[in-house]
Amino acid sequence: MNNFIKISKISLVLVYLVILAGSLVRMTGSGMGCPDWPKCFGYYIPPSEESELIFKSNHDYKSNQMIILNNEKLYTAKSDFRSSNEINLNNWILYEKHNYVTYNPVHTWIEFINRLIGAVAGIFTILMLLMSLKYWKENKNITLISLLVVLGMGFQAWLGKLVVDSNLAPYKITVHMLMALVIVGLIIYLIYTLKERENIVSDKKIKYLIIVSITLTLIQVITGTQVREFIDIQYELSKNKDLWLESPDFYFYFHRTFSLLVFFINAFLYYYAFKKSYNLKIISLISLVIFLEILLGIIMYYGDFPIFSQPLHLFLATILFGYQFYWSLFFIKNTNDLQIKNNS
């Protein structure tokens, strides 16, 4: 297999792992486990005990390392210095980007691992960009799209900083999620472009149906993030899961009902592909993921949100998008290529 495709596939898997880790961060409420960015409490390796964040006499502090003062304020070191017997606030700056002042070792390490996976994914996308340079003469799009992936990862990192600085503003979390799907789509496009394909077909009808299907999935992802935000608010109001969906908002009913439309449009796509004798492998996987998504939705509603059900639900939605987008390329790109060929 082409080495560039190998690296691209590894990058894709890592991006999906970042998405999964991010959903676990949300499920466990660990989004503020590291109150700063890119470090964690000012450390490259986060503290494992709260005592490490308490002021220490005659201790060497590095610039930007944090302490929690009186359990209510975060302070960062102005520069490298050695502390005296008593704290001197002239050496410290009050951290004012947000007022979240809590240390929870579990939350901290879950968020740190999420960032670590993101950093590894970023390294592999940079490696992917470097390897794409060999295609510059024959197909500049491969290098340019690889560059877009790296820029997208950089944007994600910057957006992650904004999310933390804003104390998890909901709309920024939604943009963060959608940007992850853009990166997934770009990497899948690269894999498709260099993959040897057989039985190429051109079918405008299925092309437009798949576009509609992908659009519906994106709407579901966006409304799903709104439902998740509603659940987060209910969690803050009451730890009793029985009460979380006692008075659902509009997004919940829309998201639940809209899933039926997603199901039926893809059921028709399966029937159409079967009727036309197209390869059913990918649409079969799409159908399976949709079935699992609906099943998980039912389990969450009637089972009071079992552990890991929410992150798995979100993760499957991103898997669904990946399969749909990859399958769409076989029809969208081939149809366009055929039109260009006929016009030339």
Image (cartoon, helix red, strand yellow):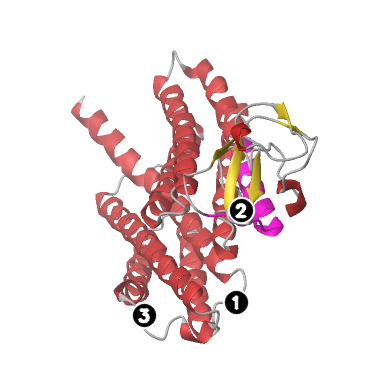
Q: Residues within 10 Å of mark 1 (few under 14, many from 20)?
A: few
Task: Where is residue 216? Give x, y as percent.
Answer: 32, 61
Q: Residues within 10 Å of mark 2 (few under 14, many from 20)?
A: many
Q: Residue at x 22, y 31 (%)?
A: 342
Q: Is residue 271 above or below residue 73?
A: below
Image quarter (top left, top right, bottom left or bottom right) of the N terminus: top right
The numbered mark at residue 35 is none
Find the residue positioned furthest to the top.
137
At horizontal 32% and vertical 66% (from top left) the residue drawn is 265
Q: Earlier in the sequence, mark 3 or mark 2?
A: 2
Residue holding disc 2: 33
Q: Amino acid at mark 2?
A: Gly
Is residue 182 magenta-colored?
Answer: no
Discs 3, 1 touching: Cβ within 8 Å: no
Mark 2 to mark 1 CA distance (whole Å): 22 Å
Look at mark 1 in the image and give the residue it sits on.
Answer: 306
User: In the image shown, does 213 or 207 lie closer to the viewer?
Assistant: 213
Task: Using the rendered view, name the quadrant where residue 127 is placed.
Answer: top right
Q: Which residue is mark 3?
A: 248
Q: In front of the other: label 3 or label 2? A: 2
**Quarter of the figure with residue 85:** top right
Q: Is residue 49 at all visible to an observer of this figure?
A: no
| Marks 3 and 1, how far apart at CA | 18 Å
Q: Which amino acid, mark 3?
A: Pro
* Residue in view at x 45 percent, y 72 percent: 231
**Which secondary structure lies at badge 1?**
loop
x and y percent of residue 37 in the render?
A: 55, 40
For label 3, the SS is: loop
Percent x, y of residue 69: 64, 50
| Mark in the foreground, 2 or 1 | 2
Quarter holding the C terminus is top left
Q: Which residues are magenta?
A: 100-121
